[in-house]
Amino acid sequence: MVDGDRSSRYRSRWWSVLGCLATVMGWGWVESSVLAQPSVKLPSVTGAARWQPAPPPIDQMLKAPATPIVMVSPNRRYTIELLPVGMAALVDLAAPALPLAGLRINPQTNGPSLGTYYRGITITELSTRQRQAVSLPANSRLSNLRWSRDGRSLALTQTTDRGLELWVIDLETASPRMLTGPILNGAYGPPCDWLPGTEGLVCKVIPTDRGAPPPMPVPPEGPIIEDHDGQRSPNRTYTNLLNSPHDEALLRHYLSATIEQIDLQGRRSLLLPPDLYDHVTPSPNGQHLLVETVETPFSYKVPIDRFPRRIALHHLNQGRNQGQSQILTRLPLADNLPLGFDAVRPGKRLFGWRTDRPATLYWVEALDGGNPGQAATDRDALYVQEATALDQPPQRLWQSSFRFRYAWWGNGNLALIEEFWFDERRVRLWQVAPDRPGAAPVLRGDRNYQDRYRDPGDPLMAQGPYGLEVLRLATDQQSLYLVGQGASPQGIHPFLDRWNLVTNQTERLWQATDPYYEYPIDLISQGQLLTQRQSQREAPNYFVRNLASSESPAQPLTQFADPIPALTDIQQEIVYYQRADGVPLSATLYLPPGYERDRDGPLPMVFWVYPEEYADRNTAGQVTTSANFFSRPEADSPLFLLALGYGVLLDPSLPIVGENGAEPNDTYIEQLIAGAEAAVNYVVDRGIADPKRLLVGGHSYGAFTVANLLAHTNLFRAGIARSGAYNRTLTPFGFQGEQRTYWQAQETYTRLSPFTFADRINEPLLLIHGQRDSNPGTYPIQSERMYDAMRGLGGTARLVLLPYEDHAYESQEAIGHVLWEMARWCDLYIGTSTVQRLRMDFQQAHAHP
């Protein structure tokens, strides 16, 4: 064992020798990542290592405050600015978490193990622009925000170490008050929903007599046994499932709740006894509750949303039925659905309330048994029924040959229904008259839903007679408003249209123009449009526009600053090029601050990839991103590498097209190579990328793509693959857009698996994976086995497993370390002296005094 002083002396001498070699060999990573911090040891090749911070200046950029999130109240009188908590600490992720039926439950709070939280709220009154900050406890963790029906109050939960408290904020006075202690049950879905008027909320509450959680039997009471009756039960590879009778007991314990009414003074009234409640939704008039309950038998193969269900209607105030419940339907365990994205659960599904009526239920029912492979003229039907007339037959409002997707309710003469069919990538829009059973539905749109150029937009909503959202009608009472992205070959320019339902003509009321990407948020009053505007140099902010006067400048509502002003000078553009077969492609090109092509020559460049599947080539080449986006990196974004002197080609189009009945994946490798070659040729031919110093990286399906590109091409010198899947035999019942099973397409599954061709990967590959990855198909074993294959075959690889992290990385420790690993890998294998000079110039220009 070497003592500390001798170890330090040897280390310094070693770094000196290594520094000389670095100068000769161009090992940029040695200088930037190691020599600058000679007291920090590199992680060992195997075993545990210490967390490394992101390299400078990225480490400081990660500390930039998060930009607030803005929401508009239902009555369009207020906006609220929500200040995110920011990156979690690893200790938060390491808190106890129970993986049960696809959920991860924090047993201390009876809520999710990790969620999105806010720590501050500021309210703006739109007519006066008066701003008030809400006085909240220090270190608040706010979530589950719910507007009251009248838009005057905001309910939310405050997560403490002991559980979830219910709070309400009066928007006019910006005054908060706590209605309950930590009694809410948020383990499965939002715990509360508003009743109309001043009646308060309906909430899931932990039973007062619940007791301690069931202990683990020691020794086990017996073996774990599963039986199968021989029916086909193809299911994708889900995670965090039940594994034992003890898991079942824990699920019952933590999901058990009573349903209570909690008024605005915090007084509580019991409505329903303990059960395993999912959704409890009050009717628009507040007289009934739509109650969805989880039932047994539980499953060890599918998550909780496939468990048996009981759908019931509970009457809060209806004459002789007051306080009683009526069962609407029961749904059996859905662990044997047919494969395919157009497959649905048989029986009644998707229950809800018409938002324009006092108490009218709607639901959808498959007419083909939920099986897209079964021949059928019609697939789905939409039914409506009055909650006060359950003894009467329901009305079939609509039926179609596609699957129901969504309904926008307006009034008795107007509703819009959207349906889709994945296999054809088609979406259709229908106009119906809900209160006129004899009126035939009118087809208002039929297109490929991947065709962004023909997307008409989505309808704007307004506060309806019961305080819920309904279609927003113009003053002529026969027109709606549509908001869309405005994709075209010339770029992305969001718009606001007025759509006349009588003539079926649209009128463009407003559209964003360069150099801005400006998106319509809402009509906050007649003629006043709230938008969010950004450009390459201006941070996203909210503005109010006067539609009556196109000459009037937009009035700023917020003034959010650039969170990372040091990156103002990054160079950003949308670039266009073609695949060899003529399919047009595009990407967003980023060049580092200070880079000049004539002076600096071709750069080392990182390609960050994620392919997409299409049913035809006409939609595959469409432009779907804007050159006017304000691009600042967050979390573990590859754009941080710009601060280190690297170029980044973000999301180069890699369309995988299946035409004339062919499946896209049958030619995945060939199309992937063609798309990558086109991107590489473009940046190399422009003289901005060094063809010998290109690295390809990606996350999830992008990581799968990285490994395939390394296995089947020599375009890249190294790769970074985060949280991917590499062996498709481990996802035998489909993955991504693939609907066939392994046994139906063995050759395709084999050819697509980079694990099969690990012996052909002769470039260094960095594999990173969260050890608690809950994404279907991307178990950590995928990266572990890929690493084992490369190690056994003599390849160069590094495996980094992140304790407690899920599919997306959350903790500040893990995010910093991931960026350190990415920077180190780039410096090791594509770094140059030009990169080092650009980095040093950037650091000197933005050094803190």
Image (cartoon, rainbow, N blue to C red):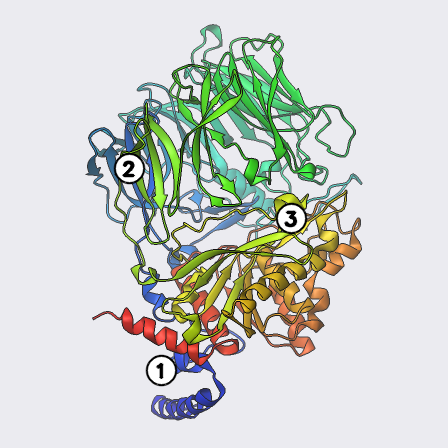
Residue with the mark numbered 3: 613
- Kindly check if marks 2 and 1 are in contact, taking CB atoms under 8 A apart as contact: no
The quadrant of the picture occupied by the C terminus is bottom left
Tell me the distance, in whole angstroms, between the alpha carbons under discs 2 and 1: 54 Å
Percent of width and height locating residue 76: 32, 27
Residue with the mark numbered 2: 554
Between 280 and 681, which is closer to the camera in this rendering?
681
Disc 2 crowd rating (10 Å Cα; few below 14, some 14-19, many 20+) is some
Of the image marks 3 and 2, the number of the one nearer the N terminus: 2
Q: Amino acid at mark 2?
A: Ala
Percent of width and height locating residue 399: 66, 20
State which mark lies toward you, 3 or 1: 3
Disc 1 on helix, strand or loop? loop
Residue with the mark numbered 1: 39
- Kindly check if marks 3 and 1 are in contact, taking CB atoms under 8 A apart as contact: no
Of the image marks 3 and 1, the number of the one nearer the N terminus: 1
Tell me the distance, in whole angstroms, between the alpha carbons under discs 3 and 2: 39 Å
Q: Amino acid at mark 1?
A: Ser
Percent of width and height locating residue 223: 68, 51
Q: Amino acid at mark 3?
A: Glu
Between 14 and 619, which is closer to the camera in this rendering?
619
> Toward which corner of the image does residue 703 lie, by quadrant?
bottom right
